[in-house]
Image (tube, coloured by chain):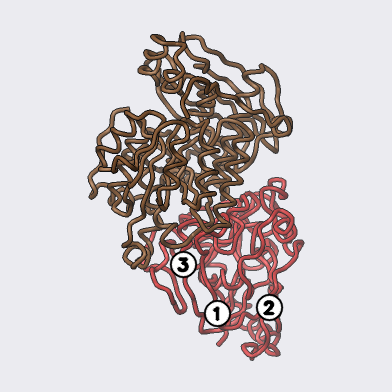
Chain colours: A brown, B red
């Protein structure tokens, strides 16, 4: 996804448009606390790590004073750009631990999802505020660990935010509110879909060239089902998160199928189909692909007895039916959502709001993707309770990597 | 015989009926309820100050609920129940409610029709009935406390909503009332208020707020039989076009105290 970085002016405009609570409180925006910049450590300096570090920098309320990534070249690239001193650039699997000891106030974690629960836990234990990329985890134990870290953060008066863009979008928020206030009648069924083309071309190239190199395997994390959680958890979570948000419920069971049919390398599938059953017999059909060309959409439609909620990540959000909502479209949800979350994170810290509302919702969506994935991998019906009791761990092969 | 011809007689009777409670401003909240000519129990709500809206961090809150301290300088009376179909038909020619029943709340009422009902009732009683302002509504909903607990067990005891309504309205007064004796403030049907819908003023203190001066929708409060718990909170608000007749929206009236 090619994108231009926003200027500071654009940044503030976007945050204001989104209505982040930060800008509603003059005291928080202009008070003495807000004027002291938070020191931030960037854990994960790959593509999104670099991109989001730039957004944090443009916010104006953060100073990135340390960086960590397994790969030294990546730490140096981000560190060089943001003038992080060499002694505060850390590499190797344990590099982030040294970053946690370097005196930062907060961390932004943008590593492969497999590492999130451990890194987030260590960060909270070290007394840091945590800004965590989605998905929060790749398996049930990981989700539980993140939920626990969120709770501990609240206890320790720390902010813990899981970064989903759609939940910041004013059109999504209004449409979901209307659906939940009854505007589409009784909710009967829904569909969620994430259709896109190949997403990891570069990683495919690396892994094709050196399939047995442990470091290449790590660089090509997006193709590894344990490191990424597979496409349904790592990417498709955006569509399923909207469905869980609207339904405000946990699925009871799921059946599914799928496979890797177009991509030659890696252990991740490139196509999933799952049918979820939610309470009150609300059925959600889900499909995704990460292949081909010509049709991309991240969509969720929820059908009620009197209307339909229709959302598109790159398009319009609306309600059609007896109580229509015209809604609209953000110019760039991918970027504006992150900008809003970065502003909210800063505001929550300066205002002392430790309620951390994103954690539970993110974990629920995350577990929903894991339920769908488990059902699809097994080709069988799996209940939520079975999944939770099994507490199955996804084990990544980290052999050959340096500490 | 035209309905209006009967009004003077009825007004006298009603005024008498309410007289024992006429100085209710000094009575405790919820006490001194009088019953009017269409059978509405009108509960006294004292003047007072409360926090309107919800603070950041409160579960299920929406950003549009930014809190402020609101003082209501005048006591008023508010009906213990939503307007029933029996009460509606005592004054209005037509009942559009898709679900019929004398003790069911009237629904599918537009805002102008709700206002018309209040005017008719005022004429009949020789008193001033109207819809509550948004602030009066929330004050009455809170009944002197903070946000009532919204866990499924507690909510199920006070409100008809998506999880227990089975897709229908229910006769009024079946659920537990709030501390001031008001039933179905949350759930059953959403309730029109007097105010236009708009963002709250960015002030810390406010007195007798009456909503924005302009806007295209009116505030509906309380959530309904089809709402999720998010909608079933004293702070939850939504804007609805005046002309809409919705099967989940009705009204509750307020009686001004002279």
Image quarter for residue B257? bottom right
In this rendering, the count of numbered labels is 3
Image position, residue B2 (x, y; %):
60, 71
Q: Chain of mark 1?
A: B
The residue at which mark 1 appears reads as B128
CB of mark 1 within 8 Å of CB of mark 3?
Answer: no
User: Does B236 appear above or below A315?
Assistant: below
CB of mark 2 within 8 Å of CB of mark 3?
Answer: no
Q: What's the mark number on residue B195?
A: 3
Please tell me which residue is depicted at 34% across the width and 67% down the height of the picture. Answer: A31
**Which is more toward the observer, A391 or A20?**
A391
Helix, strand or loop for disc 1? loop
Please tell me which residue is depicted at 66% across the width and 81% down the height of the picture. Answer: B29
Quadrant assignment for the N terminus of chain B: bottom right
Left or right, A180 with reference to A133: right
Q: Earlier in the sequence, mark 2 or mark 1?
A: 2
Question: What is the distance, in whole Å, between disc 1 and disc 3 at their CAs?
Answer: 17 Å
CB of mark 2 within 8 Å of CB of mark 1?
Answer: no
Quadrant assignment for the C terminus of chain B: bottom right
Q: Chain of mark 3?
A: B
The residue at which mark 2 appears reads as B36
Question: Which class describes the residues within 10 Å of circle 1: few (<14), some (14-19), or many (20+)?
Answer: some
Image position, residue B10 (x, y; %):
66, 81
User: Does A392 appear above or below A376?
Assistant: below
User: Does B143 appear above or below A165?
Assistant: below
Please tell me which residue is depicted at 54% across the width and 41% down the height of the picture. Answer: A362
Helix, strand or loop for disc 3? strand
Left or right, B229 with reference to B64: right
Question: What is the distance, in whole Å, between disc 2 and disc 3 at their CAs?
Answer: 25 Å
């Amino acid at each position: 996804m090619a994108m231009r970085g926003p200027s500071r002016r654009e940044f503030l405009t976007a945050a204001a448009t989104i209505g982040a609570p930060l800008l509603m409180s003059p005291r928080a925006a202009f008070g003495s606390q807000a004027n002291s910049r938070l020191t931030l450590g960037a854990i994960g300096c790959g593509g999104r790590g670099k991109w989001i570090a730039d957004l944090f920098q443009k916010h104006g309320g953060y100073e990135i004073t340390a960086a960590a990534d397994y790969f030294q070249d990546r730490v140096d690239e981000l560190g060089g750009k943001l003038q992080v001193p060499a002694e505060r650039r850390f590499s190797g699997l344990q590099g982030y631990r040294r970053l946690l000891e370097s005196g930062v106030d907060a961390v932004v974690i943008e590593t492969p999802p497999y590492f999130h629960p451990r890194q987030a836990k260590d960060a909270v234990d070290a007394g840091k505020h945590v800004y965590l990329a989605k998905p929060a985890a790749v398996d049930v134990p990981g989700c539980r660990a993140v939920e626990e870290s969120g709770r501990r953060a609240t206890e320790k008066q720390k902010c813990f935010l899981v970064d989903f863009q759609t939940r910041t979008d004013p059109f999504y928020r209004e449409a979901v509110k209307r659906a939940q206030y009854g505007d589409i009648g009784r909710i009967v069924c829904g569909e969620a879909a994430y259709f896109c083309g190949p997403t990891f071309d570069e990683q495919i190239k690396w892994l094709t060239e050196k399939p047995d190199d442990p470091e290449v395997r790590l660089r090509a994390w997006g193709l590894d089902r344990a490191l990424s959680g597979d496409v349904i958890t790592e990417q498709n979570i955006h569509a399923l998160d909207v469905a869980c948000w609207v339904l405000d419920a946990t699925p009871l069971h799921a059946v599914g199928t799928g496979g890797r049919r177009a991509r030659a390398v890696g252990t991740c599938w490139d196509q999933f189909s799952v049918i979820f059953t939610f309470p009150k017999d609300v059925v959600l059909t889900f499909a995704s692909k990460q292949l081909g060309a010509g049709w991309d959409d991240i969509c969720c439609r929820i059908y009620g007895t009197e209307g339909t909620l229709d959302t598109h990540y790159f398009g319009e959000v609306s309600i059609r039916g007896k109580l229509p909502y015209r809604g609209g479209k953000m110019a760039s949800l991918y970027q504006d959502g992150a900008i809003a979350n970065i502003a909210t994170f800063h505001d929550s810290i300066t205002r002392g709001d430790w309620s951390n509302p994103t954690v539970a919702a993110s974990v629920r969506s995350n577990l929903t993707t894991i339920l769908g994935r488990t059902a699809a991998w097994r080709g069988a019906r799996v209940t939520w309770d079975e999944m939770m009791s099994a507490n199955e761990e996804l084990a990544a092969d980290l052999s050959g990597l340096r500490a | 015989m035209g309905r209006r011809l009967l009004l003077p007689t009825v007004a006298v009777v009603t005024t008498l009926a309410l007289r024992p409670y006429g100085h209710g401003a000094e009575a405790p909240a919820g006490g001194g309820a009088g019953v009017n000519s269409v059978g509405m129990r009108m509960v006294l709500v004292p003047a007072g100050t409360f926090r309107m809206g919800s603070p950041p961090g409160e579960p299920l809150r929406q950003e549009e609920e930014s809190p402020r301290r609101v003082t209501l300088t005048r006591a008023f009376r508010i009906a213990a129940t939503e307007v029933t179909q029996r009460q509606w038909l005592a004054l209005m020619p037509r009942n559009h409610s898709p679900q019929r029943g004398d003790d069911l709340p009237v629904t599918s009422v537009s805002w102008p029709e709700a206002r018309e009902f209040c005017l008719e009732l005022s004429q009949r009683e020789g008193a001033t009935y109207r819809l509550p302002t948004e602030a009066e509504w929330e004050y009455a909903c809170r009944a002197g406390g903070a946000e009532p607990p919204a866990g499924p067990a507690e909510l199920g005891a006070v409100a008809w909503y998506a999880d227990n309504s089975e897709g229908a309205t229910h006769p009024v007064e079946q659920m537990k009332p709030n501390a001031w004796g008001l039933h179905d403030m949350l759930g059953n049907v959403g309730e029109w208020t007097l105010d236009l819908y708009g963002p709250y003023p960015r002030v810390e203190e406010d007195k007798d707020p009456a909503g924005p001066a302009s806007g295209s929708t009116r505030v509906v409060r309380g959530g309904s039989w089809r709402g999720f718990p998010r909608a079933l909170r004293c702070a939850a608000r939504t804007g609805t076009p005046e002309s809409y007749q919705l099967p989940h929206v009705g009204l509750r009236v307020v009686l001004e105290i002279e």
